Amino acid sequence: MTATAPSTDLLLALVDELREQSHRLEEQNAELRNQNAELRSQNADLREENRVLKEQVRVLTERVDVLERENADLKRRVTGRTTERTGRRKAESPRKKNDEEAQRKRRERREERQSTLPVQDVPHPVDPAVKACCPSCGAGPMSPLSPECSDEFEWVPGRLVRRRHVREHVVCGTCGRFEKGPAPVRVVDRGLYGPGFTARVVVLKLLDCIPLYRQAKALRREGLHVARATLVDLFHLAASVAAALYLRMLARVPESRVVFADETSLKMQRVEKLGYVWVFATELAVVYVFSPSRSGDTPVRVLGDSKGVLVVDGYTGYNEVTVPERRTRAGCNGHARRKFANIDDDDARRILELYEAIWAVEHEAARLGIRGTPEHLALRRQRAGPAMQAIRDWCDQHVDDHTPKSAMGAAIRYIRNQYAFLTRFLDDVDIAPDNNLSERLLRIIALGRKNYLFVGHEQAGENSAMLASLLATCVLHDVNPQEYLADVLIRIQTHPATQIDDLLPDRWKVLFAAAAK
């Protein structure tokens, strides 16, 4: 018996049911696709939100790092030590702290300076009764022996004197001809204050950073009532008299093969913009230049098209004069090292140790008396070269570990960007490994900025730069600035203009220093 075939109605019902199921599945599939698209969109939004949040975290982390670094720096300036020396240096430095030869030279220089001081003998005699009769045996008188001498240094306050110039007048009894003695040479005609007084005003302000109003108060205590405005006039008068010397010093800067340069700010009174004091130091002179801006115009004006080496930090204001047809740029490892000195980190301390090894080479060369010789250069290449390469290698390895604005990131990137300039000293013995010389010369400007706060106007800044240049060059050549300035303020009045170089501190020391004492 055969199976009964399904009826047509049943088959049609099954087909309809299948179609209905297919339609439902298609609707479900479309709904799932919509949900999937929506989830993809939400996922993309979440990814973007996550990226934005990560970027915000990175920026905030960098900002926190910068603020913490600034806060630590401010705390250190207010309450802590400001020196960058590590505690390890004293114990581990390869050079001896108390090197006997260096100590001997320092002692000789100190004794030589002290030997020029006037000596005032203060007698301490034996009691006359004791001299006449020995307290032990009664015999007498006692015989003199060589006295026992001991020195002490005492401060005798300086004296203000009223110097009266008396010009003799004579007349011929026969013809009535009248003659009188020559007029005294003064800093300015009919001037009331002498060259020594004027020089002291300048030295106290620029080398000791004593503002003029404080000087006026001190003079009143000594019995001389002089207005602050008068001291201001004397200061600017000295600058105008010595201007020719400054211009000659300025002209000598581009003649030097190696020049050290740096700049710092100095406020001008009643002007919102800061002024800037630039320093250009050579082996013969220290020249300060005041400028109302920090643009590269000042280096161009001072150095022009001169050739040689310019030792500076990474500031772009020197770019125009450090090009192939002008000066070779050398960098400042002191500046690079300083970026690591304020980081409390084992890696930073490792970099500082490498820098200690580099400066130990310079101390060793000085101790051996080979500075500036081929042996000095060979010692640099042998010991400082590997240390510089180790610093560069470490920076290359860790550059991606720190954000650019973090303290470590900024220090690493400075080394990598400036490395070609930082290693110039390995190829030229006349180039120092750092620009610390010019930075030291700007400290007196920074101290003045703290004490006298500002200069009155642009011309006042220029006059201060003129006089500061003369005084700093005196210090460079171990010339007494007070004696020098007091002498040249008068001597320049009658000195031949064609021989102006004789009045610059290095030549003055040879020609006129003995007569000025």
Image: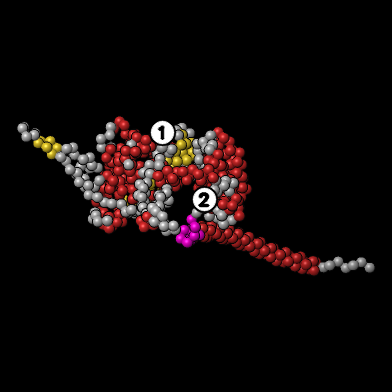
Q: Which mark is residue 192?
A: none
Front-lying residue, 496 or 280: 496
Determine the residue located farthest toward the right in the rendered image.
1
Q: Is residue 470 left or right of residue 429?
A: left
Disc 2 packing (10 Å; few <14; some 14–19; many ≥20): few
Residue 374 in percent (x, y) is at 55, 33
Residue at image x 36%, y 50%? 121
Q: In this view, does 153 lie to the left or right of 388?
A: left
Q: Where is residue 1 in the image (x, y as percent from the top left)?
A: 94, 68
Q: Which residue is drawn at 54% across and 36% down?
A: 370
Question: Closer to the camera, 149 or 417?
Answer: 149
- Residue under label 1, please give it: 255
Residue bounds of the magenta highlight: 72-82
Query: Is residue 465 positioned above or below 402 on the image?
Result: above
Q: Mark 2 points at which residue?
A: 338
Judged by its main secondary structure, the magenta piece is helix
Residue at the limit of the structure toward the left, as seen here: 174
